[in-house]
Amino acid sequence: MVSGSVLSGRLEAFRLVELLQMMGLGPSSGALHLHKDAGEAGILYFDRGTLVSCTELDTEALTLGHVLQQLDLVTAPELDYAFRQQKADPFGKRIGERLIDLGLLTAEMLHDALRTQTMWIARELAQWNAGWYEFHPGEHLPAQAGMPRIDVQDVMMEMLRHEHAWEPLQPYLADGMRTRLALPVEPPRGHPLRFAAEDWLVIAKVNQHQTIRRIATALRVPELQVAQRAGMMVRQGVLVPLGGAGGPGLPKEAELLNMQHFDLFTLLISMEHDWHKRRSLAGRLTTMAGFINQTMRALADACQESGLTLAPDTLASLLAQRGVVGVNEYRFTIENNRLDLDTFGRFCKRSLEGSSRDAIGAAKQFYDQAYDALERALTAAFEVINARVASPTERGQNREAWEALFQTFREQPSAG
């Protein structure tokens, strides 16, 4: 069913692999949202006919850490170390980049792991046979460097291969990689209780790790391999399935870095209130610079509430990456994520007074240049924060509110 610009329908009518064929996603860009009636959700992002990311919003979703361990590329202690670094600098480099810096991965290894993660999540989502979907043209993933681009045909082939491999396991592992396992109270009748080494390794991890995914991660073996061994032992009565783990939400590592405590709307209301109190050009520019400080202060508070520490050079690094280092010959003075407003205010006042003496319209030209630099600096801060918001709906609402406020700023007359 098509409603406006959104293609939607039920997964009972079209499963994901069929949906990709039907939609003709070859040249398309946008986000395909999948939902189960119980609340689970998944999103596939496409850019010009290629799959660039696949996300499942579930507390037991497949993470990059799971994949790196299952591919035997890094160990749990190495991941923990990189994650501790990220907690101390949550808006710096991501886990994969930190592992490269530590010499534990190459860029090629990280790219392959991200591609594997995307494909494995997609093949799991392809098993959803109930729920609903909707395609949002133009919706894109928050910018992330190094994301793989996978041809849709390759994704569909992986889905079909996985479906064929999973078919004999489905009766025994109904909850997929989230299936929780346990040892039976009594040994199975008729079983000789002699096991291959691979089976015994799985059995030895059941009590501690429980799910297929966690067991595979602990063993540093691809989870489909573990599922195939475990499915056979469930059929034999050696292991007992206990239902599925997880539910709507984020894995604990991603939940910690999610900017759920960042109160954007209170910040925007405060900005609008302060803006309307300033009528002069110099006052408006200094107030705009102050908005950057307010944003960073609110970000530090949100990080603290999540148990994170905002690195003191976050703002300087962010502006340097975006090439926003000052206005004309003036370079922003930044200390502990704050702009020096006094120095900047004096610079603006001198520049505007000098411009008005030199030529008609020069003051307005300087104001526009300074305003543009400050808006780009603020937008850079907003985008990096909004990219850490897990909900695509909330991200979209945040962007609409942000753009509406700055449209108001641009339209508001100034006394000069």
Image: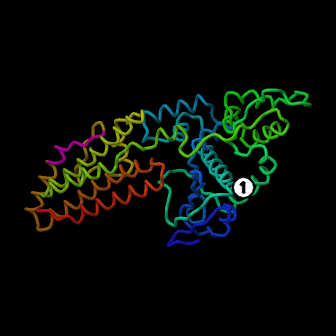
Residue 258 % position (x, y): 46, 43
Determine crowd level at label 1: few under 14, some 14-19, many 20+ residues with C-alpha closer than 10 A: some
Q: Residue drawn 11% across and 68% down? A: 360
Q: Residue drawn 11% across and 52% down? A: 350
- What segment carries the magenta color? 337-345
Horizontal side of 269 relative to 393 (left or right) equals left
Assess whether residue 292 is covered by the magenta stretch.
no
Answer above or below: position of 365 versus 71.
below
Residue 37 % position (x, y): 59, 55
Assess whether residue 342 is covered by the magenta stretch.
yes
Horizontal side of 365 relative to 143 (left or right) equals left
Q: Quadrant of residue 210?
A: top right
Q: Nearer the viewer, residue 251 or 207?
A: 207
Q: Nearer the viewer, residue 33 or 378?
A: 33
Instruction: Give the amino acid at mark 1.
Output: Glu
Residue 264 % position (x, y): 34, 49
Residue 216 % position (x, y): 70, 36
Horizontal side of 265 relative to 54 (left or right) equals left
Q: How is the image coloured?
A: rainbow
Horizontal side of 398 relative to 237 (left or right) equals left
Residue at the spot of label 1 = 158
Image quadrant occupied by the C terminus: bottom left
Answer above or below: position of 230 versus 39.
above
Q: Residue drawn 16% across and 43% down? A: 342
Q: Quadrant of residue 36?
A: bottom right
Mark 1: secondary structure: helix
Image quadrant occupied by the N terminus: bottom right
